[in-house]
Amino acid sequence: MAAFGFLRLSSAAASTALQQSSRYASALLRSSGKRAVVQNTWTTTTGGGSLITAAAVATHSSLGGWFQVPDLALRNHYFVVPLDYDSPDGMSISIFAREVVGTGKEEKQLPYLLYLQGGPGFECGRPTEAGGWVKKACEEYRVILLDQRGTGLSTPLTTSALSQFSSPKQQASYLQHFRADNIVRDAEYVRNCLVQDDEAWTVLGQSFGGFCAVTYLSMAPGGLRHVLLTGGLPPVDDGCMAETVYRALYKRVVLQNAKFYERFPEDENIVRSIVLHLAEAEAGGVPLPSGGILTPHGLQLLGLTGLGSAGGFERLHYILERAWDPELVPGSKKTLSFTFLRMVENWIDFDTNPLYAIMHEAIYCQGAASKWAAHRVRQELGDQFDAVKSVSNGSRVLFTGEMIFPWMFDEIAALRPLKEVANILAEKADWPPLYNKQLLNANKVPVAAAVYYEDLYVDFSLSQATAAQISGIRLWVTNEYMHSGIREDGSRVLDQLFGMIKGKFPLR
């Protein structure tokens, strides 16, 4: 494989806009009075055996010292890193990480654990107290919560921020640097800044964070002490695996729909009535409070969260039961309630986290384009996911799962300005490699993975195939959780994974 190569922006105006985030981060660093400059060389072996080396300077500062929430101490770290690690003297972005320890352990020597959040395009949660997996991890680790580039406080990419570019082509040139390969490079800089004596750290990756952790194993395994994966084993074959992923996941979506309607059979007619109302509306849908439009296939997006997480069935049911305004005056026109329409919008985070929609299919691409894979596979399935035809023939309306469709960039108000860049990225074929199967086959880092048998987002069979490529990995296969085990029962999940890498549960 060739070295990672990226397009460069040529517009002076765009260059000025891009530097705004760097200036903001630099101002924060100056205001703190604490600056640390770290010279680092990042090296990895590609599948072809050549070396990729990027040298750059990372600037790091801790701002404000420690602060407290119940039973936890936290402090904030900011870093200025290259947008493009192959051009370290070029444009910069800021990276934010929050350090978390148990109260009273601020100065204690503890090994580090980096947490990589699911997504793509979502920031880490903000701890309000000691609980769940964070409390468990802080028993023996110094936890680093990394806002992946483009999220949270790491040069967050919102629709309004991306409007600073003068063209979709420039947006695409910028956005191509926001995948797992560069998240790993950022993590390595953070490690070199924070961890003494260049010691390796443990990485915990949830969902897409697990995908990033497997990229870490492929590119910089020397920085890793242990790797823990929860619902996050990606397909690692070359090309674009998105079609393969969606062909598998649509089958799981159908099963989850069946379970939902068995739990709440009365919702079949409610959903049909909503679909019929939307289809008969003058514009083919009903305006949403934010300025978007709710169409029949837009309604089906509720399955993204409702079908795949703990409590999702119940929350979806409670949204649907608020669908209609009451008939206060006999004979009044039937209308969907404002409450329902607002709940539908709040259910999905595309307005605040547009990276999720823009970059989602790109996470499956190595040297090939996705070409709107989820949409194409849906068309292969014929009328199975056609909501209007389902109503007309009396069958169940099926919600969809974790799929991104091109029409979303017409119907969701916050995504409309990003339609052209989304199309550019969907057609991009020269995505650099994310995984090195040669290194994975020869892996020496202890790896333990929770694999959820009924996962709506990461197919079980594809996870097994990837596990077969990672030497020494230990799997904990369970159907007790769907995809969000780390959120539902984080202490137990971590106990199991820690036990597997530390010899508590020997091979049998």
Image: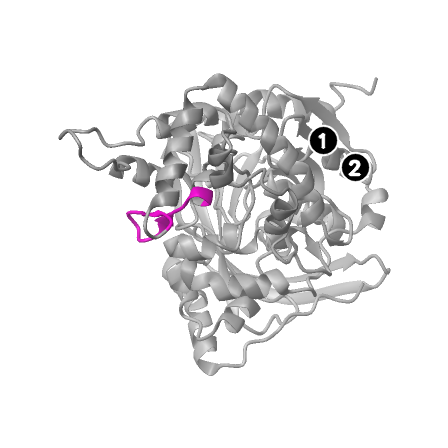
- The outermost residue toward the left is 329
Query: Which residue has dot 1 on it?
Result: 448
Seen at 49% across and 56% down, the residue is 150
Query: Of discs 1 and 2, which sits in the foreground?
Result: 2
Question: Does residue 430 lie above or below 119 as drawn?
Answer: below
Residue 266 picture location, percent across and down = 41, 20
Number of labelled discs?
A: 2
Q: Quadrant of residue 340?
A: top left
Instruction: Identify the amino acid type marked 2.
Output: Ala
Is 141 on the left-hand or right-hand side of 329?
right
The answer to whether one can see residue 163 in this image is: yes
Q: Residue 367 falls in which quadrant of the image?
A: bottom right
* In this view, 264 is above or below 250: above
Badge number at residue 465: 2
Q: Which residues are magenta?
A: 284-297
Q: Position of residue 302 (x, y in %)?
A: 45, 37
Q: Quadrant of the N terminus?
A: bottom right
Residue at position x 55%, y 29% in the image: 484
Q: Nearer the viewer, residue 315 or 397?
A: 397
Locate the C terminus and report the quarter of the image it occupies.
Answer: top right
Q: Is residue 466 left or right of residue 90?
A: right
Instruction: Mark 1 or mark 2: name the one nearer the start of the chain.
Output: 1
Nearer to me, 322 or 66 = 322
